[in-house]
Image: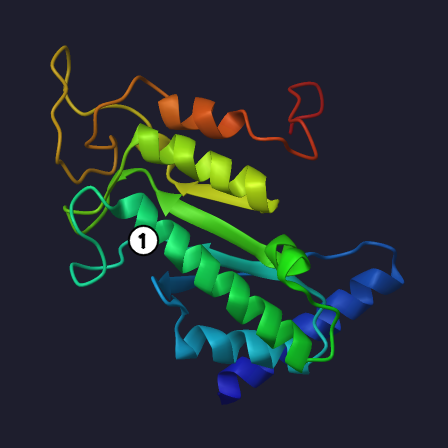
Amino acid sequence: QAANVRRAKAISAIQRALAARHTPLRVWLTLPVSSRGLTSVGVAAVQSMLAAHVQLAGVNAMAMDFGTDESAPGAMIGTVERSLDATQAQVASLWRRAGLPSSAASAWGHVGVTVMLGVNDTPVEQLTTADAQTLAGFVNRHGIPRLSVWSLNRDSACGGAFARTGIVSNTCSGVLQKPLQFTQIFGNLKGTRTASGDNGS
C-alpha cells in the first residue's frame, strides 16, 4: 500500500507539471484480471491513483492467462468478455466513490483490454481468430477505447506448410490462422488516429 501511495503521488506530480506546460499525460494502468474482474491488488492500485488525483484515463485489463480453474477448452472468448463486464462494473464503482462522473456507459470509456494471441500459457486457453472477430464486435458495441495484443511477433501460424496447433511459442500463435490475421481483424476497428510512415508514427 505504501508503494502504491508513493507511485500515485509521483505520477500525479508529473501529470500536473506536464499539464502546466500544455503537454497532457494520459495514464493507463495495465492490471491482471480474472473472470470476476480486477483482483483486490488491482483495485487498490486504482484507488491509490484516484486518491492522489491522478487524471486516470482508464484500466487496461490483461484478459489472458486466467488459469485452468477459469476457462474450459473452447470457451476463452466467454471468459474474456466476463472479465471485461466485471472490470467495467468495478471501474464505474471506483470512479463514483472517488467523486468522479460515472455511469454504466461512460465507464466503458475507461476500460481497455489486452489479449494474448492464440495459445495462452495455460494450453486449454486459446484465443482463436473467430474469438478475435467476436472481441472486435464487443469492443465496437461498448466503445472500448483501447485494445492491445500480446504480441505482434506471435501473429502467425506455427510450422511451415502444415500448421501445428497447441504450441506455446514466442514466435507463433499455436492456432490455425493466416499471417497477421489477428492484426487485420483488430486493424478494422474504428480508431482515433492513423499511423503514417511520413511522420514516423
Above or below for 195 versus 41: above
User: How far from the left and from the top, in percent, is residue 170?
Assistant: 25, 38
Residue sitting nearer the eye, 122 or 109: 109
Q: The residue under label 1 is which amino acid type?
A: Thr
Residue carrying label 1: 79
Secondary structure under badge 1?
helix
Q: Residue drawn at (87%, 59%), measured in percent from left and top?
A: 21
Q: Residue drawn at (27%, 58%), measured in percent from left and top?
A: 66
Residue sitting nearer the eye, 111 or 173: 111
User: How far from the left and from the top, in percent, is residue 108?
Assistant: 60, 55
From where the camera sits, is residue 10 visible? no
Q: Residue drawn at (61%, 68%), measured in percent from left and top?
A: 92
Side of 59 where 35 appears, left or right = left
Specify the quadrant of the image occupied by residue 102: bottom right
Side of 34 where 2 appears, left or right = right
10 Å crowding of disc 1: few (<14), some (14-19), many (20+): many
Side of 61 where 106 appears, left or right = right
From where the camera sits, is residue 163 visible? yes
Q: Residue drawn at (16%, 59%), measured in percent from left and top?
A: 68
Q: Residue furthest top?
A: 161
Quadrant of the rendering where the C terminus is positioned: top right
